[in-house]
Amino acid sequence: MKAALQAIQQQATQELEQIHDAKELENYRVKYLGKKGEVTAILKQMGKLSPEERPIIGQLANQVREEIEAMIARKGEALKAELLEQQLLAEKLDVTMPGARRPLGKKHPLTQVLDEIKEIFLGMGFDVAQGPEVETDYYNFEALNIPKGHPARDTQDTFYISDNVVLRTQTSSMQIRTMEQKKPPIRVIAPGRVYRSDAVDATHSPLFHQVEGLVVDKGVTMSDLKGTLEIVAKRLFGEDVKVRFRPHHFNFTEPSAEMDIMCFHCQGEGCRLCKGEGWIEILGCGMVHPNVLSICGIDPEEYSGFAFGMGLERLVMRRFNIDDLRLFYENDLRFLDQF
Ligand code: DAH
């Protein structure tokens, strides 16, 4: 029995080397110390021994059992430490590695140029106003001296919501809203979306943007209009830019004009960009019609004013040499990334 116990201890010591995880260790414990284990089997046979042998073998068996228990405990600790080490290794972070870069967003080209325009006008003492895109017939047409049935309405391709409510076709509606709320002196620009029932192509979109301007005060003249807009053109397109005013017609201004800038591509020679004209139209303008002042409760005998309206998309297309307006609305990052 003594030899058997010694053999068990030796075998147990060797076998411990082969154990690699907690489950194997548990099987090992059962094999030696469990109810049907090898050491337990020996202890069960103690009854057959003589009274002299019993304490000697008993002591040895206990020793072997304690020794195996201690080995199991040590191995258990070692396995735990090994597991922790593996986990730490797997979760290891190199904090000196550069982080994943997030691409930085940019302002849309329309917003970039609009911000520039706002900056220019703020510097000249203008306020920036905003108004509704769903507008009544009164603000979009009637109060702008465009009565029902007037042919000027036909050119606007209006989206009607009801007989009296439209999607505004021009930011000029903001002239009326501004003059209703404020008394002169007035200096304001009103940028925003406008809508026209146009089929989409390279130069047309049912939604586009305008920037309206309005100045009303005592003694405002056409030369104020020309001087102001010339400065704006220079700020936007460079000091060398040449401008010209051509007579035009708008119902809400008298006299009315359109302002052109000399084509910066061909310097007036005529090229593809300006369609051979040498000049590029950038806005409509004029002296506020006395009827419009009156309807807003401003006495045209005492006050005068000028107004202008420009299409933002065309301006931005000219600034960046973009030939298709649809690019502004598709939000293709390959396009937007260039600005
Ligand atoms: N509202 C006009 C349009 O959409 C543009 C315009 C012309 C605005 C002359 C004005 C102006 O303020 O004075 O075609």
Image (spheres, rainbow, N blue to C red):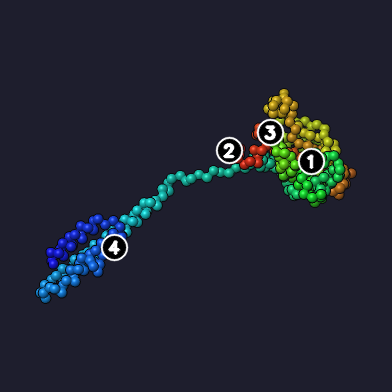
Q: Look at 58% across and 38% down and name the residue there.
A: 334
Q: Secondary structure at mark 1?
A: helix
Badge 1: residue crowd in 10 Å (few <14, some 14–19, many ≥20): some
Amino acid on which the number 2 mark rests in the picture: Arg
Q: Which residue is mark 3?
A: 318
Q: Which residue is mark 2?
A: 334
N-terminal of the pair, mark 3 or mark 4, is: 4
In the rendered image, the quadrant that contains the C terminus is top right
Amino acid on which the number 3 mark rests in the picture: Arg
Does 76 appear above or below 205? below
Front residue of 24 and 248: 24
N-terminal of the pair, mark 3 or mark 1, is: 1
Q: Secondary structure at mark 4?
A: helix
Q: Nearer the viewer, mark 3 or mark 1?
A: 1
Q: Which residue is mark 4?
A: 26
Is there any visible trace of residue 31 in the rendered image? Answer: yes
Front residue of 117 and 54: 54
Q: Look at 13% across and 66% down and name the residue there.
A: 2
